[in-house]
Amino acid sequence: MVQQKATQQVRKAIIPAGGLGTRFLPATKAQPKEMLPIIDKPAIQYIVEEAVQSGIDSIIIVSGRHKRAIEDHFDKSYELEKELEERGNEEMLTIVRDISHLADIYYVRQKEPLGLGHAVLCARRFIGDEPFAVLLGDDILRSEPPCLQQMIAQYEDTGSSVVAMMEVPWDQTHKYGIAAFDEADPSRIRDLIEKPAPGQAPSNWAVVGRYVLDPAIFELLEHAKPGKAGEIQLTDSLQRLNHISPILAHRFTGKRHDVGDKLGFVKATIDFALEREDLADEIKKFLRERLF
Ligand code: UTP
């Protein structure tokens, strides 16, 4: 495959957060799942921080119902800051102030949750004609350097769109977009299949929530028909894009937490707690007492 260095930098990112979050009902009845806290920080803040650490300067969050909670979280909170200042709580004041300075964040509303592909399409005008990143609002990826930073470097070296992938147990492949690879070049994706039926997956490498994409994807999404579950699937348009310009896999080796899933959420909470100086000892003690 002929590879060329990218001519444009990746500066913008889309964070889709317009899904219904049905796996987490009733907690998500009146708040987006992206606002569920992992310890003391909403999931979506971890995602925004990864984007910023990866060099992204403008972010568009695609929100649906309950957009206010996300918008308020990243906005300046005059009353709270004033209150913390009066109480002399400098530590919390800095934490709260820093959130509103993280990045330039914009919002677009997805009027109906028609699928991930449709959510990405809703941000088309904001992105324009430049390469961009997509970070799913409920997928926390942990690595050093951050996953997205590694993917942007891969994009800039090759000029090809990049999708993050991880190995999943074979009996879980029906829950993911699954790749078949080019035999001559294992970084090159040959096919992408959204949620293959059990036993039909061509590999156990699954798409996880990070993408660096060529803006040509928008034209494909514009004409995309509903796929699996009647939704406009991003994977289907990626498969088409792959025929026009090759897509590469970034084989991610860090930790991933799908916090839109109950089990994933609990595991993430324990994982983060075990790394916190203020919580680790007590959590370990509690788990030991509970289990043994
Ligand atoms: P999910 O499939 O995990 O979200 O989409 P969901 O549909 O809310 O989940 P469940 O199955 O009902 O629990 C991955 C990401 O894409 C966003 C979601 O908010 C999530 O961050 N998404 C999904 C949208 O923005 N719009 C959609 O129409 C669908």
Image (spheres, helix red, strand yellow):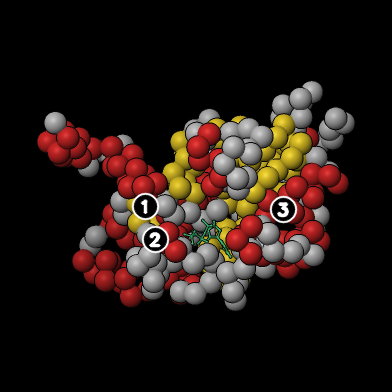
Q: Amino acid at mark 3?
A: Asp
User: Is ligand 1 less than 8 Å from the beta carbon at label 2?
Assistant: yes
Residue 230: which quarter of the image?
bottom right
Q: Secondary structure at mark 1?
A: helix
Residue 235 percent coordinates (x, y): 68, 51
User: Is ligand 1 less than 8 Å from the beta carbon at label 1?
Assistant: no
Q: Is residue 270 left or right of residue 177?
A: left
Q: Amino acid at mark 1?
A: Lys
Label 3 vs label 1: CA separation? 27 Å
Residue 215: which quarter of the image?
bottom right
At x 42% / y 59%, what residue is drawn? 23
Relative to 30, does residue 121 appear above or below in the rendering?
A: above
The quadrant in which the C terminus is found is: top left
Residue 241 is tagged as: none
Residue, disc 3: 236
Mark 2 vs 3, N-terminal side: 2
Residue, disc 1: 262
Q: Secondary structure at mark 3?
A: helix
Q: Is residue 83 left or right of residue 268?
A: left
Residue, disc 2: 24
Residue 208 percent coordinates (x, y): 57, 44
Residue 159 is at least partly visible in this image: no
At x 72% / y 26%, what residue is drawn? 186
Is mark 3 in CB contact (under 8 Å) with mark 1? no
